[in-house]
Image (cartoon, rainbow, N blue to C red):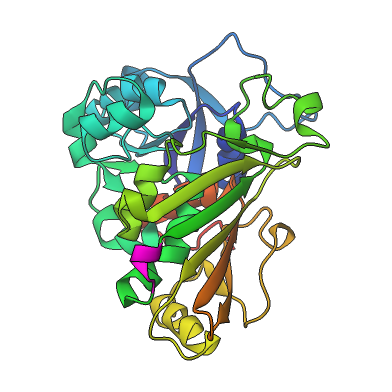
Amino acid sequence: MNVPVGVVGFRGYSGAELVRLLERHARVEPWLLEHRADAEDRPRPIGRPGPRRLACDAGAVGRQGLALVFLATPAEVSLELAPAMLDAGARVIDLSGAFRLRTAENYRRWYRGEHTRPDLLAEAAYGLPEFCRQSLGRARLIANPGCYPTAANLALRPLVEAGVIHLEAGVVCDAKSGASGAGRKPSLQTSFCEVTENFSAYSILDHRHVPEILLTSGLEEAQLSFTAQLLPLDRGILETIYFRCRNLASAGELLEIYSRSYAEEPFIRLYEPPRAPDLRGVRHTNFCDIGLRLDVAGGRAVVVSAIDNLGKGAAGQAVQNMNLALGFPETEGLL
């Protein structure tokens, strides 16, 4: 029998994408946990009712024997639900920012709220498999990374570790995302008439994803300039990262650093210079595509990192983390 897993927040964009992936997964049975029973569902064709439903209640989760629960919910809701689900015996993968940062002080600064469970904040495993795989198999609580940090850290960390970035000169991360990254809750900023035929920057110098990039990449805050921008499309993230490099004689050497770092990684795809990835290539996938250019004479380098914000940036990565946590093949349901 397939392993039962639950999804809270299945009506949101990331939650709906998660359900879509789980429905085609060969080893799990998804259950929809009703947290907001008054909300309307999208219509389904006759004869296709979708996954079974269960009250979003710790007792019901325990009685049904759900092995794992996904929380595709805002951070404040995850803070409320995660402890109860853990007490019910389910493992938890949280797609919000509730458990990504390591201290309550850091959470307070960037999320502008009090963290009610600093003990779980300290316990949570950060779920970027390419760098944190060994901690996921035994973790009760996994903090699924943010979409912007996923694209940034996969591009930056190998280079920081290799010591080829001139850190004193700084790193500029120019990040662009589709509107689904803001979630399904209506807002003026993401309404159709504001987004279409438009292009705008937001949360300049204080985006809440900055500390995630710092924690994983190895950069200091003064070394990173990050700006998020909203594209007039539904999904996808493309980050163009600029920096000065040192001790490199060719773009091939830069590519070789990535090749060594990601030789065994199933969801990282590299491009031969001077080619670079685009959003069309990663839509509806769990891939992160990376391309690069290097001006040897001037020491200037540009790295382009592309993901689907609902795939590798959210639901796809959550399924990848579930596979590792439950002992399934890492690529199950994703290729």
The answer to whether residue 315 of the structure is visible from this angle is: yes
Q: 92 or 198, which is in the foreground? A: 198
The residue drawn where x is 30% and y is 51% is 215
Quadrant hosting residue 130: bottom left
What are the residue bounds of the magenta stretch?
165-169
Could you tell me which residue is drawn at 22 percent across and 30 percent down?
Answer: 105
Q: Is residue 24 visible?
A: no
Task: Find the residue positioned furthest to the left.
Answer: 119
Examine the structure image and report whether residue 188 is included in the region drawn in magenta. Answer: no
Q: Residue 123's x, y, as percent?
A: 19, 40
Q: Is residue 55 above or below residue 66?
A: above
At 25% from the left edge and 41% from the top edge, which residue is drawn?
124
* Relative to 32, 24 lies left or right: right
The overriding secondary structure of the stretch rendered in magenta is: helix
Quadrant of the image occupied by residue 286? bottom right
Residue placed farthest to the bottom in the image?
Answer: 249
In-front residue for pair 126/302 = 302
**Picture coordinates of residue 227 (x, y %)?**
53, 45
Identified at 42% across, 19% down, the residue is 56
